[in-house]
Amino acid sequence: MNLVLLEYEDFAHEGYVRLLGRRFEHVRRVHRAASGDELRIGMIGGKTGVGRIERIDDGALEMTVRFEAEPPAPLPVRLVLALPRPKVLNRTIAAAVSMGIREIDLINSWRVEKAYWTSPKLSEENLRLQAILGLEQAGDTILPTIRQHELFAPFVRNELPQIVGARLALVADPGGEKPCPRAVTTPVVLAIGPEGGFIERELETFREIGFTSVNLGKRILRVETVLAYLMGRLF
């Protein structure tokens, strides 16, 4: 946790917060903070700043806070992601948010197991927690918008063309016809399929609405690895 994220419920009064639960335990056990120490803080949806611990014991942490700086700028990318396995979903959401991605569309694909859509990992509560973990890692404060589209064709054919607009539209695929571009200067809509890639019919649907299929070389990579590779290469 590189940033302690605060919410309105944490404030005892203006400029003074009281923390319990996960964040308190992390500060106490991992940071091993004591009274008088200062921590990096941020207000969800707002600025970052500094918190000075006034009291910490086995039950709670209290600190005075001041907010000074804007959060980091987001990446100019909208991520369209074939729903990963539930165990992988948490890591991927946290990683995407830590990189500065603020719009994520989770979509279906032929290779996505139907059971994935019933996983509790897709609950609003869990997705928000994973996003918060990503923000804490990166020192950011702005929660992403995460949308779920259980039907592939209605979203890709009807909604995605309006989302793309003038943006660079790329779909990552092991057999993509072009190498992924480097250091782009325009906003991007990026589609990433399951670990085996989208099937050909799905790829053709993306191509029909203006996407270019791009490859990352010969290796088949895990979803979270592909995401990190592409963000480093594109931006």
Image (cartoon, rainbow, N blue to C red):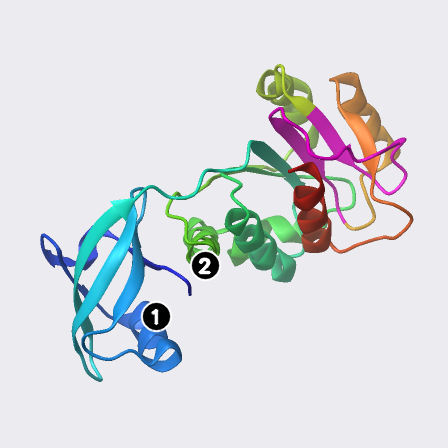
Residue 27 in percent (x, y) is at 33, 74
Q: Earlier in the sequence, mark 2 or mark 1?
A: 1
Residue at image position (68%, 39%) is 108
Residue bearing mark 1: 22
Residue at image position (74%, 42%) is 193
Task: Locate residue 210: give its quadrant.
Answer: top right
Q: Write the start and end of the magenta stretch as one range.
A: 169-194
Residue 109 in percent (x, y) is at 73, 39
Quick one: label 1, few (<14), some, or many (20+) residues within 10 Å?
few
Residue bearing mark 2: 133
Task: Locate residue 18: give its quadrant.
Answer: bottom left
Label 2: state its secondary structure: helix
Q: Quadrant of the C terminus?
A: top right
Q: Is residue 162 above or below residue 98?
A: above
Q: Is residue 226 above or below residue 33?
A: above
Residue at image position (24%, 73%) is 37
Q: Amino acid at mark 2?
A: Leu
Label 1: state its secondary structure: helix
- Of 107 and 6, nearer the camera is 6
Q: Quadrant of the N terminus?
A: bottom left
Q: Cα distance, mark 2 to mark 1?
A: 11 Å
Residue 132 in percent (x, y) is at 42, 54
Left-right relation of 75 to 15: right
Task: Locate residue 73: give its quadrant.
Answer: top left
Question: Magenta stretch containing residue 193, yes or no?
Answer: yes
- Of 113 and 44, nearer the camera is 44
Question: Magenta stretch containing residue 93, yes or no?
Answer: no
Report if the CB atoms under discs 2 and 1 are less than 8 Å apart: no
Residue at image position (58%, 21%) is 163
